[in-house]
């Protein structure tokens, strides 16, 4: 079971935002983060808890291990709106969090 | 470049079956499998299962395995998912995604296939 918080947030361009993902049991660092814009397929941002994927801007960062993880956007940009999902890849089924919808003020 | 190209949208009646394809290209398949993920309208992502294109190994989400079968054609690097006894709550966009063996990250996604179940 993966639980994200908050379920939604509204922030201004340039703000620093943090999304939290909690696992019901330890998943070590097997945690991935995805971004989904409306009407599009998700794209991967971070794998292994903190490994920034190729081509992903440096304003995104991930941290955590065990049961608690965070995704931080250091300076929110207009293209960052959409929904963010965490997913554990420690075991199957590879469950997703319920998502965090980010709106730009 | 890595591409996952899925088959087109489907409209089915309750109780029918649907089979969706996902053709992979641009990478060597032994290091990767394909995960299937679905998203009901306005809802989050649901992981359905994983399959290896190179040897056909599978791993299913328990709540779907009775109605859901993943197959592969290694000669064409194509993965398939078939869902039987369709219900209205199976209406969703179905995605395939490349799944790196041992890491479980979904690093490339297909464009999605909308399946609508309606009488």
Image (spheres, coloured by chain):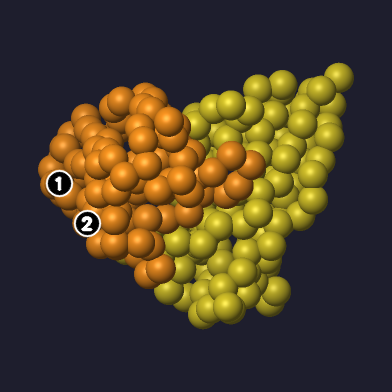
Chain colours: A orange, B yellow
Q: Is residue A70 above or below residue A46?
A: above
Marks 2 and 1: in contact by CB < 8 Å? yes
Q: Residue at x 62, y 75 (%)?
A: B25
Instruction: In this rendered view, identify the residue nearer to me: B115 or B43.
Output: B43
Whether residue A9 can be seen here: yes
Separation of disc 1 and disc 2 at Cα? 8 Å
Q: Is residue B88 above or below residue B76?
A: above
Viewed as shown, does residue A24 lie left or right of B35?
left
Q: Residue at x 61, y 69 (%)?
A: B3
Percent x, y of residue B46: 49, 36
- The circle drawn on residue B3 is none
Percent x, y of residue A52: 29, 62
Q: Quadrant of the N terminus of chain A?
A: top left
Percent x, y of residue B73: 67, 67
Tell me the crowding category of disc 1: few under 14, some 14 to 19, or many 20 or more residues within 10 angstroms, Cα based: some
Question: What's the chain of the residue with tag 2?
Answer: A
- The circle drawn on residue A64 is 1
Instruction: In this rendered view, identify the residue nearer to me: A43 or B39.
Output: A43
- The circle drawn on residue A50 is 2
User: Which image quadrant is residue B66 in?
Assistant: top right
């Amino acid at each position: 079971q993966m639980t994200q918080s908050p379920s939604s947030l509204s922030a201004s361009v340039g703000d620093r935002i943090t999304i939290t993902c909690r696992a019901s049991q330890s998943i070590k660092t097997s945690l991935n983060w995805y971004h989904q814009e409306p009407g599009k397929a998700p794209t991967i941002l971070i794998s292994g808890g903190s490994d920034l994927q190729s081509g992903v801007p440096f304003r995104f960062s991930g941290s955590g291990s065990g049961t608690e993880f965070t995704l931080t956007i250091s300076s929110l940009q207009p293209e960052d709106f959409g929904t963010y999902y965490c997913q554990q890849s420690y075991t199957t089924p590879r469950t997703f969090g319920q998502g965090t919808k980010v709106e730009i003020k | 470049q890595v591409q996952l190209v899925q088959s087109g949208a489907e409209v089915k009646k309750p109780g029918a079956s649907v089979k969706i394809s996902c053709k992979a290209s641009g990478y060597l398949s032994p290091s990767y499998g394909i995960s299937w993920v679905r998203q009901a309208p306005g809802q989050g992502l649901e992981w359905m299962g994983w399959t290896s294109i190179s040897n056909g190994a599978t791993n299913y989400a328990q709540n779907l395995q009775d109605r859901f079968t993943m197959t592969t054609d290694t000669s064409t690097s194509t993965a398939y998912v078939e869902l039987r006894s369709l219900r209205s709550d199976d209406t969703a966009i179905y995605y395939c995604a490349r799944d790196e063996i041992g890491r479980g990250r979904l690093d490339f996604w297909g464009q999605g296939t909308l399946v609508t179940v309606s009488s």
